[in-house]
Image (cartoon, grey):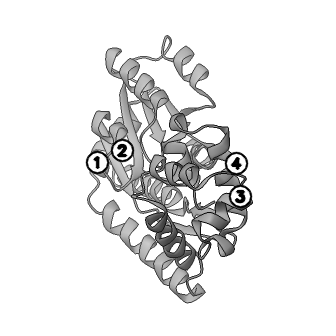
Amino acid sequence: MFLDSRINNNFNKLNENDLHIAHFINTHIKACKTMKIQDLAEHTHASNATIHRFTRKLGFDGYSDFKSYLKFEAEQSHQLPSDSIKRFKQEIENTFSYLDRIDFELVTNKINQSETIYLYGTGLAQMNVAQEAQRIFLTIHKNIIVLHDIHEFKMILNKATSKDIFFIISLSGESHQLSDITNLLQLRQNYFISVTTLKDNMLAQRANYNIYVSSNTFYLEDGTDYSSFISYHIFFETLLRKFNERKENGDII
């Protein structure tokens, strides 16, 4: 919902009363856009000062700044469908533009030289991308393993060799778990490629090679934020075609 990212980023600052206020706002967005601080305090059984402190904990200057944010986010969530389709088309076009910058010769060489290809997604949607990438890579007759959680990842690192390659698929490229994983990969000098959205992030910085795709977040009618992973699938489909072209041309054996 609207406040989820703000809540997650500032969770350690919040108490039970703050979470109760956040829940009320998320379930009464339309009313809260114009609600006075006194009215919100009454509905949530809190004081004006508590509401004000809550908004400050989330990074706003005060309640007025917070209401402006609610209005803006609500407007973003009700854009015309045509605008949504236009942005989706632009997202696909941007992805192909980014793919033109990829050194596919380097990536396909690494795949060709590898004994095992490991795929890891940092969330459910990312794991779906990894599983589809596994299906794609099976056509090139390689040993493909999807790692389903952080524990599997750490266990496999004791068996992985210098000829193996890792693809790590992430939306933000930022998390404590990713930091742990990349530290271990670098320690063991395992080659890994990041696949993330186009922005500076920890995973891309640490990877031996980074792939960027376009994935814009937009809001559904109920305020839920939605990120498309179609661009991630496009990358792996393109990678297969590039690999096959080089095979047909005799560039790789």
State yes or no: discs 2 and 1 in contact (Cβ < 8 Å): yes
Q: CA distance from mark 2 to mark 3?
A: 51 Å
Q: Earlier in the sequence, mark 2 or mark 3?
A: 3
- Give the residue pinned by disc 2: 108
Can you give x and y, in whole percent of width and height, for residue 215 in the image?
46, 62
Of tags 1 and 4, the one toward the viewer is 4
Of tags 2 and 3, the one toward the viewer is 3
The reply to whether residue 86 is visible in this rendering is yes
- Give the residue pinned by disc 1: 105
User: Amino acid under label 1?
Assistant: Glu
Residue drawn at x 53%, y 49% as measured from the top left = 54
> Which one is nearer the viewer's eye here, 195 or 222?
222
| Number of other residues with Cα within 10 Å of mark 2, as a class: few under 14, some 14 to 19, many 20 or more | some
Q: CA distance from mark 2 to mark 1?
A: 5 Å
Can you give x and y, in whole percent of width and height, for residue 82 in the image?
55, 88
User: Amino acid under label 3?
Assistant: Phe
Q: Quadrant of the C terminus?
A: top left
